[in-house]
Amino acid sequence: MAICALILDFDGLILDTESPMRTSWLEIFEEYGLIVSIEQWASLLGASADPPEAYDLLEEHLGERVDRIALHDRRMSRELQLLELETVLPGVRKLISDARSAGLGLAVASSSERTWVEGLLKQHDLIEPFDAIVCAEDVAHTKPLPDLFLKALEYLKVQPNEAIVFEDSQQGVKAAKSAGIFCVAVPNKVTRCLTFEEADLVVSSIEDYSLPEYVAMPSSAR
């Protein structure tokens, strides 16, 4: 069957929110003498916009509980400051524009909260092209379970073999494959240290292929 829709992750795929988040956490970790490798950090991404495992690591290192609310507020203030310097990632605008011109459905499927995703999409003038935006509040379980992608398929009124997912995290790739959807992994600056063996295709940038090349790939892989 022909590809009728594209489903995009948000954090780290449309906008590099992952680097500001990592920097804001690293500054806190360093303050307390905790070293977290990029591989360990990258493995936490994809399931939540505010990984509880980050707090767990700090508490385990300190041997005591931390004020998670105060820590979150402090970290988010720094992350938002750094996020002001970020722009939409290469190839994203063209992919979206070409998809609309070709009559393909478009959705965002993110483990983050709606206010975060929609707020940043509006800020970068990218919300209008999407037919559906599926966020953490819309499902019982976020990635690596398939709920977000299944809900996106439902909104787009397409079957799994009629869509392509673009993801930047291992958790996201697992979710897409669990939903039965062809998945293109686009590792970002934080997640490129990981392997993406479950992905159908791994690219260094969305710009690596044109839209016609992407939509032809699922049928050639069958």
Image: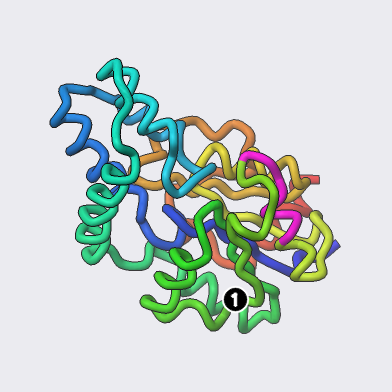
Q: Position of residue 212 (x, y in %)?
A: 64, 67
Q: Does the magenta stretch include residue 172?
A: no
Q: Where is residue 32 in the image (x, y as percent from the top left)?
A: 17, 26
Q: Can residue 213 be seen in the rendering of this structure?
A: no
Q: Does the magenta stretch include residue 146?
A: yes
Residue at image location 30% in from the left, 37% down from the top: 67
User: 128 or 57: which is nearer to us?
Assistant: 57
User: 167 or 43: which is nearer to us?
Assistant: 43
| Vertical side of 53 occupied by 45: above or below | below
What residue would you read off at disc 1?
Answer: 130
The kind of secondary structure element at disc 1 is: loop
Dominant secondary structure of the residues highlighted in magenta in the image: helix
Q: Position of residue 18 (x, y in %)?
A: 36, 49
| Vertical side of 67 occupied by 50: above or below | below
Q: Position of residue 41 (x, y in %)?
A: 37, 32
Residue at image location 29% in from the left, 42% down from the top: 22
Q: Would residue 53 appear left or right of 134 to someone viewing this image?
A: left
| Residue type highlighted by circle 1 | Phe
Q: Quadrant of the N terminus?
A: bottom right
Residue at image location 71% in from the left, 50% down from the top: 147
- Tell me the quarter of the picture where residue 174 sits: top right
Residue at image location 36% in from the left, 56% down from the top: 16
| Vertical side of 50 occupied by 34: above or below | above
Q: Can residue 83 be seen in the rendering of this structure?
A: yes
Q: How many labels does the image show?
A: 1
Residue range (magenta): 144-151
